[in-house]
Image (spheres, rainbow, N blue to C red):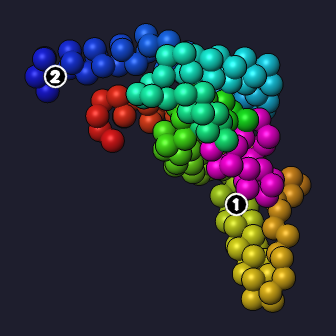
Amino acid sequence: MPYQEVEAMLGLLARLVFDARTGGLMLLLVIAAVCDYRTQRIPNALIACGAIFGVIYTTVVPPVVHATALFPLSGLLMGLLLFLPLYLLRAMGAGDVKLLAMIGTFLGPLETFYAALASMIVGGVLSILWVLAHGRMLHMLQNLAAFFQAGLLGVLAGSPSGLRIAPDVSAGKLPYGVAISTGTIGYLIVHQLGLL
């Protein structure tokens, strides 16, 4: 790769890190990931302060032309709605849902969707690595088979399946804030470099 291309890429990444909106978001995501990894919790104070900063900053210095306060608020709503079904199935914690909502205040609705998609891809990879590292792959596959079998039987019977993941039969608990943070930062970098 020519030196000029490397220099241009580093310049783009520096702009991403030193921009108050994206740099602040990445800092909050790193803190959230560390907290979730260490304590299995994402502090509500971190999410609330981040969301307030995101709404105010994105309203005052909008990332898109003619954006109003609806831009960060619709991003917040998008973040809540995307992961809420997973929370209701007990496949994700409330802190993870709130973390994506906070991300939405910085990115708006469309980029929040892409960040969530990247987070789910990273989460899938990390989940497989997590169960492999803990020797729980067979247990995870059995849980998936039971989960989909119960769902299919419920649909065929025409009744609500009541699908839920019970904590006592789980193959393990991945700190999903790590996946959300890694996926979002990865999305921001790929987008900044013009690869997406």
Examine the rendering and report whether any part of residue 38 can be seen. no
Q: In the picture shown, does residue 143 fall above or below 32? A: below
Mark 1–mark 2 CB contact (< 8 Å): no
Residue placed under numbered mark 1 in the picture:
140
Expressed as whole percent of the image width and height from the top left, the position of residue 127 reads 62, 48
Say which amino acid is labelled 1: Met
From the viewer's perspective, tell me whether residue 27 is left or right of residue 163.
left
Would you say residue 94 sits in the magenta stretch? yes
From the viewer's perspective, tell me whether residue 130 is left or right of residue 23.
right
At x 80%, y 81%, the residue is: 154
- Quarter holding the C terminus? top left
- Quarter holding the N terminus? top left
Task: Estimate how packed mark 1 is, as few (under 14), some (14 to 19) or many (20 or more) residues with alpha carbons within 10 Å.
Answer: some
At x 81%, y 55%, the residue is: 88
From the viewer's perspective, tell me whether residue 62 is left or right of residue 141.
left
Examine the rendering and report whether any part of residue 62 can be seen. yes
Give the mark, 1 or 2, whose residue is nearer the N terminus.
2
- Magenta segment, which residues? 78-97
Residue placed under numbered mark 2 in the picture:
5
Q: In the picture shown, does residue 33 fall above or below 128? A: above
Would you say residue 15 sits in the magenta stretch? no
Expressed as whole percent of the image width and height from the top left, the position of residue 129 reads 58, 46
From the viewer's perspective, tell me whether residue 91 is left or right of residue 30.
right
Residue furthest bottom in the image = 157
Which is nearer the eye, 73 or 172? 73
At x 79%, y 58%, the residue is: 89
At x 75%, y 22%, the residue is: 48
Element type at mark 1: helix
Say which amino acid is labelled 2: Glu
Q: Distance between the residues labelled 1 and 2?
A: 44 Å
Expressed as whole percent of the image width and height from the top left, the position of residue 122 reads 53, 44
Element type at mark 2: helix
